[in-house]
Amino acid sequence: MKHWLKPGLILLIAMTTPLLLLGGGDAAAGKPVYDKKCAMCHGAAGEGKEAMAKMLKVEFRHLGCKEVQAKSDPELSKIITEGTGKMKAVTGLSVTDVANVVAYVRTLAKK
Ligand code: HEC
C-alpha cells in the first residue's frame, strides 16, 4: 500500500463506521423524505392530519410525543418499512432514506 493511501483510508473508515454502526441518519436529508412520504398523513410537524385521521378512522399520536420517541431507531425503521396497524409500509425508500427519516422524526420530539 502506498504510504499516502493509508491515512486517507483510515480517515474514511473512521468517518463512515459510526454512521453504519448507529444507523445514524442525517436529519437534514430526512426532511424532504418526510415531507414527501409522511407529511400527508402525519402533518408537517408530526401532529397528524385531521382529514386523514377521519378517512383512516384512526387517531394520530404526535410523532414527537414521548410514547413514539420512546421507540428505538430499529423499531421506527420497522414501522416505516413494514407498517403498523392502519399504516401501510412506506415504499420507495432506500435504507439511507429510512435512517435519515428516522433521524428527522427525532427532531420532532416535544421539548
Ligand atoms: C397513508 C398515511 C400514512 C403515511 C404516508 C405514513 N403514515 Fe405513519 N402512521 C399512519 C397511521 C394511520 C398510523 C397509526 C397506525 C395505528 O396505530 O393503527 C401511523 C403510525 C406511525 C408511527 C407510530 C406512531 C405511534 O403512535 O405509535 C410512526 C412512528 C409513523 N407512523 C411514522 C411514519 C413515517 C416516518 C412515515 C413516512 C416515512 C409515515 N409514518 C407515513 C399513517 C401513515
Image (cartoon, grey):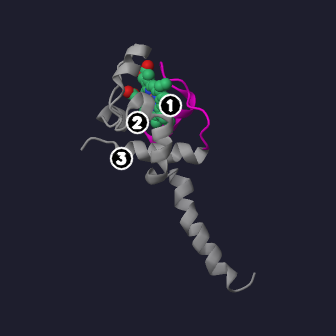
Q: Residue flagged by tag 3: what amino acid is it?
A: Thr
What is the residue that sits farthest to the left in this orientation?
Answer: 111
- The Cα–Cα distance between marks 3 and 2, rounded to whole angstroms, is 14 Å
Secondary structure beneath dot 2 equals loop
Q: Is residue 49 above or below residue 5?
A: above
Percent coordinates x, y for residue 18 in the rendering: 52, 60
User: Of residues 46 and 83, which is closer to you in this image?
Assistant: 46
Precedes in sequence: disc 3 or disc 1: 1
Precedes in sequence: disc 2 or disc 1: 2
Q: Mark 1 near ligand 1 (CB under 8 Å)?
A: yes
Q: Which mark is residue 71?
A: 2
Q: Which residue is mark 3?
A: 107
Q: Nearer the viewer, mark 3 or mark 1?
A: 3
Q: Which residue is at 54% across, 54% downward?
A: 21
Q: Which mark is residue 105?
A: none
Quadrant of residue 10 within the rendered picture: bottom right
Precedes in sequence: disc 3 or disc 2: 2
Please state the extent of the stretch shown in magenta in the rendering: 72-94
Q: Which residue is at 48% across, 45% downward?
A: 32
Q: Nearer the viewer, mark 2 or mark 1?
A: 1
Circles 2 and 1: CB atoms closer than 8 Å: yes
Task: Report ligand 1 position as a quadrant.
Answer: top left
Specify whether residue 75 is in view.
no
Q: Mark 2 near ligand 1 (CB under 8 Å)?
A: yes
- The Cα–Cα distance between marks 2 and 1, rounded to whole angstroms, is 10 Å
